[in-house]
């Protein structure tokens, strides 16, 4: 265990994974934390890692990948290279043969292709079929992820209710690549990761060499913080605007038809979670306990990368969100001095 802090939060009493309050350090151990990084008012104020060197290890981000792709899409929309109101088949005609033929780019961005789907981890569910097709494992129902996108039987619904669906991001990534003629790993590096100064970010690929769009990005924890700081800074890094303040403002507004409160009852916009519509918070989440919480109201960034034994744990997720808020409240009592993170 490695710890360094400008303000000692290790003893801060926070909600525990079993419901009873516990010190922060115990929560980090109980919730299978690999790395925790907290920035407040532009300063790095607390870091914790389960082992030496974890801060600069390249770790899987899983579905935090989606939010990086959301920013790529935002930049392309602002350039006029991607039209969110166009049907996906105008970019990828091959999608006309399957369940995505009736949806728009905006539907993919906000995961509104219908409400008859639930992202579960059943052995015979869509996620399992997606994984098998990506790896082209024996018995895979499709030859590749793109074959799956073209042949998936479900009928997509334009501007339907929100339903979180990783396959939507796979379709979005293909649309973006076709619109630009450029692979997503190159686009992400040119538009987002490179300008942020990220080192070692790498995308996984499927058996046919295509980028894994819905969860394939691995990054160093310190570079995940750079992405979060850019979002807190209204899309800017230094003097360079990665994506406009209008994009970030639109994110925080959420979708017009969604709820107005609660992490599980908020909104989803452009591949980001919006805990409270019209608030100042944004979330990027990944399976097995990856969380990037960006709260402009308290100017706090909370990065927790973990190794939960199960892909999804609603109780652990709710506790982690509450812990992030508790840390921000504690830090707001006084701005601590800066500590330096590795480059």
Image (cartoon, rainbow, N blue to C red):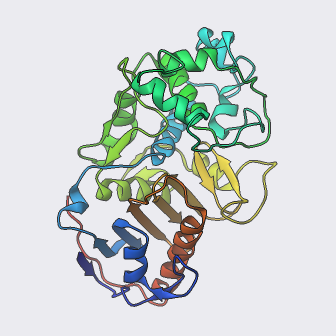
Give the left or right position of residue 305, taking residue 156 as reference: left
Count of numbered labels shown in the rendering: 0
Q: Is 47 situated above or below 308?
A: below
Name which residue lies at 40% across and 52% down.
227
Give the left or right position of residue 43, taking residue 257 as reference: left
Give the left or right position of residue 21, taking residue 242 as reference: right
Q: Quadrant of residue 253?
A: bottom right
Give the left or right position of residue 330, taking residue 268 as reference: left
Q: Position of residue 295 (x, y in %)?
A: 54, 67
Residue at the left extreme, as displayed: 52
Using the rendered image of the protein, determine whether residue 79 is visible from the camera's viewpoint. no
Q: Position of residue 17 (x, y in %)?
A: 52, 76
Q: Is 49 situated above or below 326?
A: above
Name which residue lies at 27% across and 69% down.
50
Q: Quadrant of the C terminus?
A: bottom left
Name which residue lies at 51% across and 28% down.
173
Q: Quadrant of the N terminus?
A: bottom left
Q: Is 205 situated above or below 60?
A: above
Q: Position of residue 329 (x, y in %)?
A: 53, 83
Q: Position of residue 183 (x, y in %)?
A: 39, 23
Name which residue lies at 40% across and 20% down.
182
Q: Quadrant of residue 101?
A: top right
Foreground of the two, 261 or 2: 2
Using the rendered image of the protein, determine whether residue 255 is visible from the camera's viewpoint. yes
């Amino acid at each position: 265990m490695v710890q360094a802090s400008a303000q000692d939060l290790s003893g801060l009493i926070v909600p525990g994974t079993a419901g009873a309050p516990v010190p922060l350090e115990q929560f980090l151990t109980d919730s299978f934390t690999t790395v925790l990084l907290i920035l407040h008012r532009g300063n790095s104020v607390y870091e914790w890692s389960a082992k030496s060197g974890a801060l600069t290890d390249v770790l899987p981000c899983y579905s935090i990948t989606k939010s990086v792709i959301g920013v790529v899409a935002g930049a392309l929309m602002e350039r006029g290279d991607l039209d969110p109101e166009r049907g996906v088949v105008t970019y990828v005609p091959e999608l006309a043969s399957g369940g995505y033929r009736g949806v728009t780019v905006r539907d993919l961005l906000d995961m509104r292709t219908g409400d008859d789907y639930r992202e579960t981890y059943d052995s015979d569910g869509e996620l399992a079929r997606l994984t098998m097709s990506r790896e082209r494992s024996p018995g895979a129902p499709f030859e590749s992820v793109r074959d799956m996108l073209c042949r998936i039987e479900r009928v997509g619904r334009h501007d339907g209710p929100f339903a979180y669906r990783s396959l939507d991001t796979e379709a979005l990534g293909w649309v973006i690549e076709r619109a630009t003629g450029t692979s997503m790993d190159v686009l992400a590096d040119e538009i987002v990761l490179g300008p942020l100064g990220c080192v070692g970010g790498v995308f996984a690929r499927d058996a046919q060499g295509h980028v894994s769009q819905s969860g394939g990005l691995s990054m160093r924890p310190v570079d995940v913080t750079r992405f979060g700081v850019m979002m807190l800074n209204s899309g800017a890094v230094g003097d360079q605007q990665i994506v406009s303040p209008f994009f970030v403002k639109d994110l925080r507004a959420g979708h017009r038809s969604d709820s107005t409160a609660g992490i599980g009852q908020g909104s989803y916009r452009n591949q980001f979670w919006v805990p409270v519509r019209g608030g100042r918070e944004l979330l990027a989440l990944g399976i097995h306990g990856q969380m990037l919480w960006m709260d402009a109201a308290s100017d706090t960034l909370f990065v927790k990368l973990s190794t939960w034994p199960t892909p999804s744990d609603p109780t652990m997720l709710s506790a982690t969100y509450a812990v992030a808020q508790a840390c921000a409240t504690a830090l707001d009592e006084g701005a601590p001095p800066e500590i330096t993170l590795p480059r």
